[in-house]
Image (cartoon, helix red, strand yellow):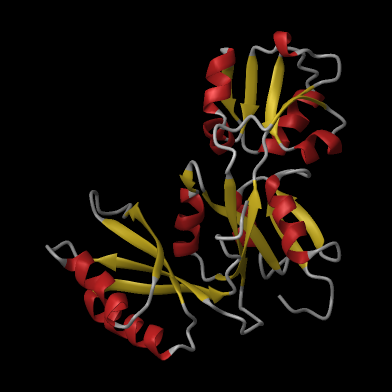
Amino acid sequence: MSMKTRPKVAYYGEQGSYSEQAALQHFGPDATLEGYRFLPEIFEAIGKRIDCGIVPIENSIEGPVTQTYDLLLESDLKIIGEEIVKIEHCLVANPGVLLKDIKTVYSHPQALGQCRSYIEKHGFNSIPFYDTAGSVKMIKERGLMDSAAVASSMAASVYRMKVLAKSIQSNKRNFTRFIVIAKKNKTAAWNKTSIAFGSRHKAGSLFRALNCFARNGINLLYIESRPVRSKPWEYNFYIDCEGSLFDEGLKKAIKELRSDATFVKVLGSYASAGRGSRN
């Protein structure tokens, strides 16, 4: 994102969250960062108090962040970039607490799911919390000596807490993809496009919709379905594909899709963060 002034960027969670890490990774140290407790607050603030936001959309183990997909459909914001962060979860507790003292762990539901094997092995109770770093902040403020948080080493450092165990996620190849959202994209370095569409409730409708891309030589990278809230057992679909809105093949595929789908919404074209080079 190109700006003459330092961009004001909203991220999800408290200081020390993985979203803050993604923001630093994407924008560097010159951006002004501000944490928000709830995802809808970020979508609401963009264009008013802040320039853009960075939010989680998909984890390689636990799958999609469904609220992000729902908010993208409801909002007029565009995806203008993405970032991939390797997730290294730690068990974080107050100074003086030992592993044998822990009875309960707190964290974001996705983080708890990513560490399910470790939690079950130690017989911990798990309680969902709104944010990984927020759970560290909470157990510090409450002085909980029988509880720990699942969070990053960065969060432990920010709140001066103790790391009881490192890399406790069930799968060591654990990544979260974050998207950058804004009112408009100010760059043209695009090689990836995200689209939402509705499929008619008839046999073959989804096949015909997806075939629009195959006919025009467009490689699909990802597909996700979400229920239509007002129509039980009907679904909207989200896809990521290679190419930009400047590409003739993709423009033709989208035009054909509009004739087969109940609606089509282009969520954004942007530069891909890439997946193949991640360790």
Residue at x-position 50% and y-position 42%: 61
Q: Nearer the viewer, residue 171 or 2?
A: 171
Quadrant in the rendering for residue 95:
top right
Residue at x-position 46% and y-position 57%: 69
Horizontal and vertical percent for residue 250?
Answer: 39, 83
Quadrant in the rendering for residue 47:
bottom right
Horizontal and vertical percent for residue 231?
Answer: 25, 54
Quadrant for the N terminus in the image: bottom right
Check the image and report above or below for 176 versus 127.
below
Check the image and report above or below for 59 versus 216.
above
Tell me how many marks there are: 0
Q: Nearer the viewer, residue 143 or 220?
A: 220
Horizontal and vertical percent for residue 60?
Answer: 51, 47
Q: Is residue 210 left or right of residue 26?
A: left
Check the image and report above or below for 195 versus 138.
below
Residue at x-position 29% and y-position 54%: 230
Quadrant in the rendering for residue 169:
top right
Residue at x-position 70% and y-position 17%: 147
Q: Is residue 267 left or right of residue 235?
A: right
Horizontal and vertical percent for residue 275?
Answer: 56, 60
Q: Is residue 271 left or right of residue 11?
A: left
Residue at the limit of the structure toward the left, as seen here? 203
Check the image and report above or below for 3 versus 96.
below
Q: Nearer the viewer, residue 62 or 53?
A: 62
